Image (tube, grey):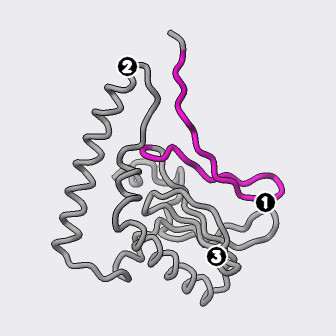
Amino acid sequence: MLAQMLQGQFEVHREWVHRTARGERLLVLHGDQLDGVVPCPRWLTRLGDVLHDATVMVSHRVNNLRRALGKPYWPLAERIKLSIAQRALHRALRTTRRRQRARQGYDGVVCGHIHRANLRRIEGTLYANTGDWVESCSALIESERGELQLLRWRTRRTPG
């Protein structure tokens, strides 16, 4: 609905090819297109969704308390995700993206679906995951020379 309201002001694409200042061709996509590649029973997917929502809710409450106590943000949901089967999913998605990239001649893939910030070359292929603004407070930027860099913001206590 938002896209319809702002029609003509911006474009929305499922996939996009970004050419860096160095001339590298990067496939940019959300990453959810590859979910079906990793076999997973429907009930487990639903359970994962419920647990994720609950974790985010608890994380917000914990961090509201931490903020009230003058403590910095603590990425609870991100820490939990990294300690469970997310690593296997991450590996499977990375492998799938590399295969897709190889078939289509891209120099790398940029995505964000699994919210695990990452920037590295795997077997000569650039793999970049932007992370997110909620849990990992991360972003991917490109310098004028075409070099990509992963930024992570750490919240600091401001005197008040």
- Residue drawn 62% across and 53% down? 140
The residue wearing badge 1 is: 146
Residue 55 sits above or below residue 147 on the image? above
Residue 158 sits above or below residue 31 on the image? above
The circle on residue 131 is none
Q: Distance between the Cα atoms at labels 3 and 1?
A: 19 Å
What amino acid is labelled 1 in the image?
Gly
Circles 2 and 1, Cβ within 8 Å, touching? The answer is no
The circle on residue 122 is 3
Disc 1 is placed on an element classified as loop
Whichever of callouts 3 and 1 sits on the residue coming sooner in the sequence is 3
What amino acid is labelled 2 in the image?
Leu
Q: Distance between the Cα atoms at labels 2 and 1?
A: 41 Å
The circle on residue 69 is 2
- Residue drawn 37% across and 19% down? 69
Which of the two marks, 2 or 1, is nearer to us in this view?
2
Q: Is residue 2 left or right of residue 40?
A: right
**84 or 27, which lies in front?**
84
151 falls in the magenta region: yes
Residue segment shown in magenta: 134-158
The x and y percentages for residue 31 are 45, 69
